[in-house]
Image (cartoon, rainbow, N blue to C red):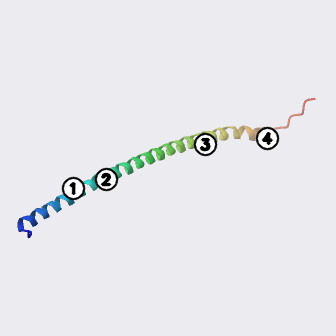
Amino acid sequence: MFPTKQHLTTARTLGVAIVAALGLASCATYKDEFATINSRLDQLDMKVQNAAQSAESANQSAQQANQRLDQIEGRVQQLEAGPRRKPRG
C-alpha cells in the first residue's frame, strides 16, 4: 500500500499534534521550575530583610551606646582634672 496524499496529511497532522503535546508538557515542567526558583528567591528575600532589620537594630544600639559615652565623658574629664582626694585611713 502506497501512502496517499490523505495518509501523508494525516501523518503530518499527527506529528504536529505530538510535537505540540510535548511542547505543552515541557511548559508545565518549566512552570514548576520557575515556581521553585521563585520560592527560593522569596526565602532569600526574607533572609535579607531580616538581616537588614538586625543590622539596623544593632546600629541603633551602637548609636545609643555612643550617646551614653558622650554624656559621661564630660564627667570623667571633670573628675580627672579636679583635685585628688586624700586616701582614707
Residue lying furthest right: 89
Residue at image coords 75%, 41%? 77
Disc 4 from disc 1: Cα separation: 87 Å
- Image: 14 above or below 56: below
Residues at badges 4 and 3 in contact (C-beta under 8 Å)? no
Q: Position of residue 84 (x, y in %)?
A: 85, 37
- Between disc 4 and disc 3, the foreground one is 3
Lower position in the chain sequence, tag 2 or tag 1? 1
The type of residue carrying mark 4 is Glu
Disc 2 from disc 1: Cα separation: 13 Å
Image position of 47 (left or right of 88): left
In this orientation, which residue lies closer to the viewer: 23 or 48? 23
Lower position in the chain sequence, tag 4 or tag 1? 1
Disc 1 from disc 3: Cα separation: 61 Å
Residue indicated by mark 3: 62
Q: Position of residue 51 (x, y in %)?
A: 51, 45
Residue indicated by mark 2: 29
Residue at image coords 79%, 41%? 80
Lower position in the chain sequence, tag 3 or tag 2? 2
Circle 3 crowding by C-alpha within 10 Å: few under 14, some 14–19, many from 20: few
Residues at badges 4 and 1 in contact (C-beta under 8 Å)? no
Residue indicated by mark 4: 80
Residue indicated by mark 1: 21
Q: Quadrant of the N terminus?
A: bottom left
In this orientation, which residue lies closer to the viewer: 6 or 68? 6
Lower position in the chain sequence, tag 4 or tag 3? 3
Instruction: Give the number of the disc on residue 34.
Output: none
- Between disc 4 and disc 2, the foreground one is 2
Disc 4 from disc 2: Cα separation: 75 Å
Disc 4 from disc 3: Cα separation: 26 Å
